[in-house]
Image: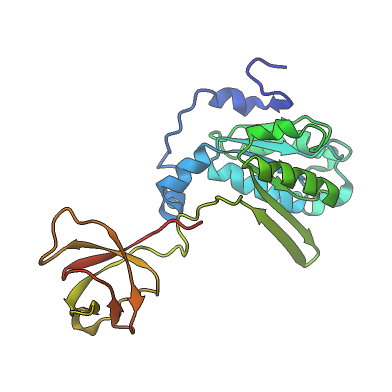
Amino acid sequence: MAAGAMDGVVPTEVDQKTQGTTSEIDESLYSRQLYVLGHEAMQRMGRSHILIAGLRGVGVEIAKNIALAGVKSLTLFDPEPARIQDLSSQFFLHPEDVGKPRAEVTAPRVAELNSYTPVSVYQEKDLSSNLESLKRFQVVVLTGTPLKEQVKVADFCHANGIYVTVVDTFGLFGTIFNDFGKDFICVDPNGEAAVGGIVADIDSDGLVSALDESRHGLEDGEYVKLLKGKRLKSDVRCAIQLRLAGVYFVLLQASIGLASRIKVRER
C-alpha cells in the first residue's frame, strides 16, 4: 500500500495532488454554493470524510454531487461487477466496464470532477466485517445495501457519532432514512434569511408594535436581538424569545429600538 494511505483504502491519482491542501474555501469556485449554504456549512463539509456504499444510479448521483460540493475526502464502496443494465442509470460506466468492480472503474471518473476532493476506493470485502474501519468517516451513505447490513452499520455508526443516510429507489418510488445522532444540532431550522425591523413602541405589558403597522414576518417562539434604541444599553445583546399577538404585534420585555431576528441552534 502506498505510504500515507489509510488501512483498507486505496487512493486515486487525485489524492496525491491534494495532499497538504488547506481547509480554506476557494470562493471563486464555490461562490454560488457559499451564497446558499454559508461559510460555516462549507467549512464543516471541507473537514468531512464521506463513505458512499453502492454505485448504481442513485449512489453515483450522490457521489457526483458530494465530489462537486467539496468535502475533505470521498470514499466509494461497491465491489460488485458492473452489469449491462447499469449503463442505463450509472452515467460513469462504459460498455467496456461490464464485469469490472463498479467502484474501481467509477472512482477515477468521479475524481476528475473536482481536484479539491480526493476520491478513494474502500477495499474491504464488505461493510460489516470490519466496522472499526468506519470510524474514520463523519458520514456514511448506504444505497443498494441488504437490510441486515444496514442495521449493523447503522447501529455501529449511531454508537460512534457517525451520521448515516440510507437511500434507495424502486422504479418511481424511493425511500430515505437519516440518523444524525441524538445530539444533532440544526444550525438553521427554516433556511430563511434573518431580517431586521424597526420597533415603534413597547407598552408596559411588553406589547411591541412595528413601525407604521408593517408586518413583522416573525413566528411564535422565535428569538430577536435588540440592536440599539432608547433606554437600551450599548452592551445589551441578549436573545429575547417572543410570543405573537398578531401580524403587527409581538409580546416581549424590552426597550424601544431596532430589532433583528436571530437563528437559534436546535437539537
Q: How many marks?
A: 0
Answer with the quarter of the image where residue 231 lies.
bottom left
Q: Relative to 236, does residue 76 appear above or below in the rendering?
A: above
Residue at 41% from the left image edge and 42% from the top image edge: 28
Residue at 35% from the left image edge and 76% from the top image edge: 243
* Residue farthest toward the top in the current orientation of the protein: 3
What colour scheme was applied to this rendering of the protein? rainbow
Q: Is residue 241 left or right of residue 42?
A: left
Q: Nearer the viewer, residue 10 or 264?
A: 264
State whether residue 92 appears in this view: no
Residue at 62% from the left image edge and 42% from the top image edge: 161
Residue 224 position in % (x across, y down): 30, 65
Residue 121 position in % (x across, y down): 72, 32
* Residue farthest toward the left in the current orientation of the protein: 230
Q: Relative to 121, does residue 148 appear above or below in the rendering?
A: below
Residue 233 position in % (x across, y down): 13, 58
Answer with the quarter of the image where residue 136 lies.
top right
Residue 57 position in % (x across, y down): 75, 52
Q: Nearer the viewer, residue 5 or 16?
A: 5
State whether residue 184 appears in this view: yes
Q: Is residue 221 left or right of residue 70?
A: left
Q: Is residue 92 left or right of residue 73?
A: right
Answer with the quarter of the image where residue 119 lies.
top right
Q: Nearer the viewer, residue 222 or 50?
A: 222
Q: Relative to 228, does residue 155 appear above or below in the rendering?
A: above
Q: Is residue 40 left or right of residue 196?
A: right
Q: If the image is split into quadrants, where does the N terminus sit?
A: top right
